[in-house]
Image (spheres, grey):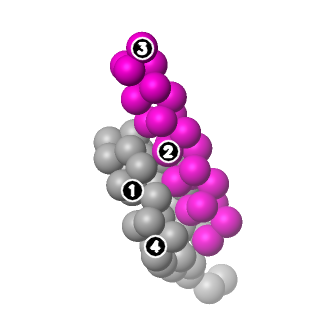
Amino acid sequence: MMVYVLVALNILSIFICHYIAKNRGAKPVFWGVMGALFGPFAIPFAFVSKPEKTVPG
């Protein structure tokens, strides 16, 4: 039972990190992977992530 809770928490962390990064202009795929690797510990870092630098053109 506990394993299911941990898996659900990890999947939720992936979506939250992806969503935060997408809204902040950061790399959403990168932050989704960070959410997968570090779980809820990655969420605060996604909040302080810097936007991607774009080349003016």
Tag shown at residue 13 = 2
Q: Is residue 11 visible?
A: yes
In reply to whether residue 21 is colored magenta, the answer given is: yes
Tag shown at residue 42 = 1
For the stretch drawn in magenta, the main secondary structure is: helix
Looking at the image, tell me whether mark 3 or mark 1 is earlier in sequence order.
3
Residue 3: where, in percent of width, then height?
37, 19
Tag shown at residue 1 = 3
Front one among 20 and 56? 20
Asked if residue 19 lies left or right of residue 50, the reply is: right
Outermost residue, bottom side: 56
Mark 2: which amino acid?
Ser
- Disc 3 and disc 2: Cα gap in Å? 19 Å
Mark 4: which amino acid?
Ser
Residue 29: where, in percent of width, then height?
50, 49
In reply to whether residue 9 is colored magenta, the answer given is: yes
Where does the magenta region start and end? 1-24
Residue 27: where, in percent of width, then height?
51, 60
Find numbered disc 2 in the image and state the secondary structure of the residue it sits on: helix
Q: Residue 8, relative to residue 23: is it above or below?
A: above
Tag shown at residue 49 = 4
